Amino acid sequence: MQTKYWQLDKEKINSKILQQAAKIIKNDGLVAFPTETVYGLGANGLSENAVEKIYLAKGRPSDNPLILHIDDVSWLDVLARQVPLSARKLIERFWPGPLTVVLKKGGNIPELVTAGLDTIAIRMPNHPIALKLIEFAGVPVAAPSANLSGRPSPTTSQAVQEDLDGRIDAVISAGSANIGLESTVVDCTGEIPEILRPGSITKEQLELVVGNVAKCYDLNVKVPRSPGMKYRHYAPIAPLYIINFEVTDDALLKFFNQLLQEKRQVGVLANSRLLSVLPDDIVGLGGWHLEDDLDYIASNLYGWLRMFDEAKVDVVIAQGVKKEGLGQAIMNRMEKAAGLKFLSSETDLLGFFT
Ligand code: TXA
Ligand code: MG
């Protein structure tokens, strides 16, 4: 299939083109579109046939449910059997925005959307193009991140093109997604709201609105509560290791020099202080100014991982950040990309080569 590309300006709504894109969705086609988190791959969320195409285009396992994107809260009572007070409060505070709520599922939603679960994930994105597209489509739009399953989520339309060109009907391009990490997913069906996937809306922010909130996204757990969290995800092709301890410049220099001596193509993610002491022959570099430049890291992380693939590095060494605030979501994605491989001491650094 020949994929159509539209370049739009986020600030100037082009109704004519968005009507055409909406028509594709109404006709069970697939349209990738920008949101404030990452680019999504949209289809009519009420059509089994359309939703099936999403799984095929992405190569996504069919037991991983989708998020329905809406432009108006009136959809809630159609899609959900019950909207508890906690969900109402969170929606009131954070929508439109990077928050997905999981609720008890209402009637008439294709089984494929929820992968057979009795709950449904819903979000209202904070992006004028996404909202207009959903409005014109006139249906809830099922939209996973617009990447091939297993690859880092796309934060630009170029990344969508790399993965899905020829596999979907159209791509609406409108610059970079500004947050860069997927929405915070919160299950509101129980006593206490539970975070199933950390995102840019943090536990602390949620707790200011609804009191106690639980974290349910430990990557070591065998059966995660959010089905998507069990898949190797967000991963660059080369193995990624996280350095999660304070290391002396001396030890680091030795480590990197040995990697280079062994003719490894090395990619590094680190703050600028650390980057400044590295040898010059590192192939791929992703860097941030200070350790606490978290917004910058979030919006660039997936781009850096894709850049490492393109540079064909054969190992990536990443410096961890503190798991505080947005650092929780950043480390969740980094740890998934690493498959929980850590370098936690100088002994680990030395042991790397044996
Ligand atoms: O920011 C986002 O949420 C982006 C943009 C495009 O909106 N979308 C996104 O969708 O990240 P996706 O499909 O890549 O991730 C959806 C996550 C998966 O981890 C999935 O398992 C989880 O939400 N999920 C969906 N429905 C669920 C449900 N009923 N119960 C628990 N987890 C659910
Ligand atoms: Mg995804």
Image (spheres, rainbow, N blue to C red):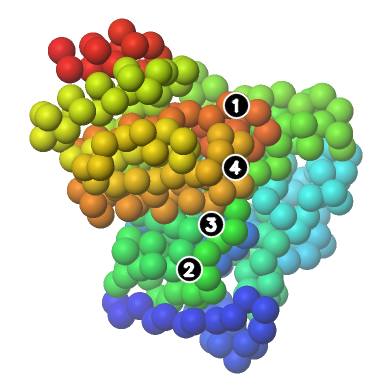
Taking the spot 11% from the left edge, 29% from the top edge, the residue there is 262
Residue 127 visible to an observer of this rendering: yes
Q: Which residue is mark 3?
A: 38
- Residue 290 or 17: which is nearer the viewer? 290
Q: Are marks 2 and 1 in contact (CB under 8 Å)?
A: no
Ligand 1 is within 8 Å of the C-beta of the residue at disc 3: yes
Report the Cα–Cα distance between label 3 and label 2: 10 Å
Screen quadrant of the C terminus: top left
Classify residue 313 as left or right of residue 318.
left
Among the 4 quarters of the image, the one containing residue 143: bottom right
Q: Amino acid at mark 1?
A: Lys
Q: Earlier in the sequence, mark 2 or mark 1?
A: 2
Q: Nearer the viewer, mark 2 or mark 4?
A: 4
Q: Which residue is mark 1?
A: 323
Which mark is drawn over residue 277?
none
Tell us which disc is closer to us: 3 or 4: 4
- In-image side of 103 versus 253 (left or right): right
Which amino acid, by three-letter code, is at mark 3?
A: Val
Q: Amino acid at mark 2?
A: Ala
The first of marks 1 and 3 along the sequence is 3
Question: Which residue is label 2 attached to?
Answer: 32
The residue that mark 4 highlights is 293
